[in-house]
Image: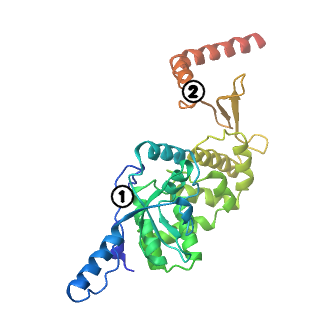
Amino acid sequence: MGTSLMARNIFNQPRKDEEESAGPSPAPIKSSKLPGSVGGLRESLREITANSIRDIDPDRIDMDGLRDRLILEDSSIEDLAESIRKHGQQVPIMVRPSDQPDRYRIIYGRRRLAAIRKFGGTVKAIVRTLDDDASLIAQGQENNLRLDPSFIEKSLFIREMQEAGYKPSVIQDALGLTRQGVSNHRVVLEQLPDELIRLIGPAHGIGRRQWGDLAALSEKVPLVDIAREILAGLPDTTPSSDKFQTIYVACTSEARGTTNQSARSQTTVVKDKSDRPVGTLSVDGKSIAIKITRKDNPGFCQWLEERAATTLQELFEQWQNERGSGN
């Protein structure tokens, strides 16, 4: 299983939509042709079978193997399910025969399989007979054309592969990384508590340097305790990358001694009379920030944008007047 199986880095420039073209599939293992027309016919039938797409009941497919995502059930799965329901499954998944009769094991396409299971029906699948190493590399190659795994997801995937006993060369082929690249991911992961990663999530867009900076604070501050306190004040819909940034700022401030336990950065969710979130108010030792999400409140965002500067000036003048009268 050499590097020739890996044409490029699987985590560069991902394609995120179900309707996009499928990635390269591993070629079926060729056997020596039998002499004469019988051998040619058997070879042709073997090639047709290897490349055919079958409709399979999702209940016959086992979700085994190594996970390369922190989150499999999220809003993107709902969007994917709706897209497939409207337009059909444009890109097949890949499975391999199970040891149990009439069952299969997933190689790649876990998100598509999860989406189709939401509304029922069969799933289009390519069936290939691959060993564990070839399956792992196929999974890595195909991910190049799907939702890009984040740095921390790749790090967890590396750890799973190593603990499962895969050879370094297979891991490098699956991820398109050098030995040093694999080591860089693993070193950062070893410094981070698993619970902290679970609390933050995949954090797309947060790279090795940022995760490394957070990991370096593990010896100075209680990362998990701070993360729990910060996340308790954030909406459940807060993007994972925003969770990371908020936690990192709080941990950095704690490590520098710029805030004490009671003055640590706090985020409050402001709600309307119907108990629906309007926005968030974040306060720390350096600033006060008001955040309104356009997706949740597009009309209010537009209204506030048109009046923000004037409103801030009025508040400042009110403060000056009250301060003057108080003196």
CA gap, disc 1 and disc 2: 36 Å
170 sits to left or right of 51: right
Instruction: Characterize the local packing of mark 2: few (<14), some (14-19) or many (20 or more) Cα atoms within 10 angstroms.
Output: few
27 sits to left or right of 71: left
- Residue at horizontal 35%, vertical 71%? 49
Tell me, yes or no, if residue 177 can be seen here: no
- Residue 193 occupies which quadrant of the picture? bottom right
Dividing the image into 4 quarters, which one contains the N terminus?
A: bottom left
219 sits to left or right of 326: left
Q: Residue under label 1, please give it.
A: 22
Residue furthest out toward the front:
38
Say whether disc 1 or disc 2 marks the residue closer to the N-terminus: 1
Amino acid type assigned to the residue bearing label 1 in the image: Ala
Looking at the rendered structure, the number of numbered marks drawn on it comes to 2
Is 129 situated above or below 325?
below
Tell me, yes or no, if residue 227 can be seen here: yes
Q: Secondary structure at mark 2?
A: loop
Q: Position of residue 105 (x, y in %)?
A: 52, 69
Amino acid type assigned to the residue bearing label 2 in the image: Asn
Residue furthest out toward the bottom:
35
- Residue at horizontal 29%, vertical 80%? 42
Q: Position of residue 165 (x, y in %)?
A: 56, 80
Q: Residue under label 2, please give it.
A: 297
239 sits to left or right of 177: right
Q: Position of residue 317 (x, y in %)?
A: 64, 13
Q: Position of residue 152 (x, y in %)?
A: 55, 59
User: Which residue is nearer to you in this view: 103 or 254?
Assistant: 103
Q: Secondary structure at mark 1?
A: loop
- Residue at horizontal 44%, vertical 79%? 169
> Residue 277 has which mark?
none
Please identify, in this view, whether the residue under mark 1 or under mark 2 is nearer the observer.
Answer: 1
User: Which residue is nearer to you in this view: 301 or 114?
Assistant: 114
